[in-house]
Amino acid sequence: MKYACQAAKKLQDILQHFNIENLPQKQEEMHMIEHAADQEKHTMMNQLAREFITPIEREDIIDLAQALDEVTDKIEDVLMRIYMYHINDIRPEALEFANLIVQCCDHLLAAMQEFYNFRKQTHIHEHVVEVNTLEESGDKLYIDTVHQLYGEDGKTAVKIGWVRAFDRFEDCCDGCEQVANLLESIIMKNT
């Protein structure tokens, strides 16, 4: 989850200090984070393959690892869409989404740090609930923003680019919620 947090904070920083000239370099930096996350997932899978007995079902661990990796992938995908659609100016709603994603990732990281000891009283459930609440805020922001975009005058290509970028922002929030729901499901099955 640390890589998803790094990617979320990198995206937030890129958008706050947006410079179209630096975008290719920033994409490369983001890709390095995504690649490191992939490497960690592969290392974890190799370790899991060597474990004889795990405290949690292997399938649950694999699902959780995949969902965690997908969050980082989805964050990188936002930046790719901004590049692909020649987005030159950052809308305030994009910054709002970036803030939501950072908050989701921070809560997931906190939950994951407690996960090793989930059978004892922890705050995991509180973090899961907060991620679900943030995801609902992301849904509302997505609906309102797309509605607003289609009501504005301007170039159709710019609107389409932003709509597709906002699709990816919203997908990030959904990915975070999926991780939160998996955590809760694993805990329920194992307590």
Image (spheres, helix red, strand yellow):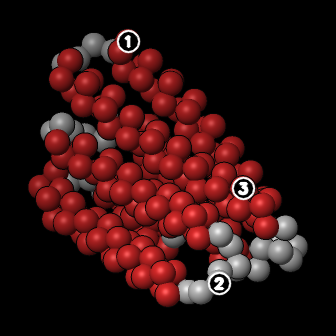
Q: Which residue lies furthest to the front in this view?
A: 52
Residue that appears at 25% across and 24% down: 160
Residue holding disc 1: 151
Please state if 60 lies on the left or on the right of 148 as rendered. right
- Cβ–Cβ below 8 Å for labels 2 and 1? no
Which of these two is toward me, 123 or 12? Answer: 123
Give the amino acid type for the residue marked by disc 1 in the picture: Gly
Residue holding disc 2: 53
In this view, 81 is above or below 65: above
Q: Which of marks 2 and 1 is nearer the N terminus?
A: 2
Task: Tell me the mark number nearer the camera, choosing from 2 and 3.
Answer: 2
Image quadrant assignment for residue 16:
bottom left
**Image x and y of residue 13, in percent:** 37, 61
In this view, 138 is above or below 42: above
Please state if 74 lies on the left or on the right of 132 as rendered. left
- Cβ–Cβ below 8 Å for labels 3 and 1? no
Image quadrant assignment for residue 21:
bottom left
Q: Residues within 10 Å of mark 2 (few under 14, many from 20)?
A: few
Measured Cα–Cα span from mark 2 to mark 1: 57 Å
- Disc 2 is placed on an element classified as loop
- Disc 3 is placed on an element classified as helix
**Image x and y of residue 182, in percent:** 64, 56
Residue holding disc 3: 185
> Can residue 160 be spotted in the picture?
yes
Which of these two is toward me, 11 or 39? Answer: 39
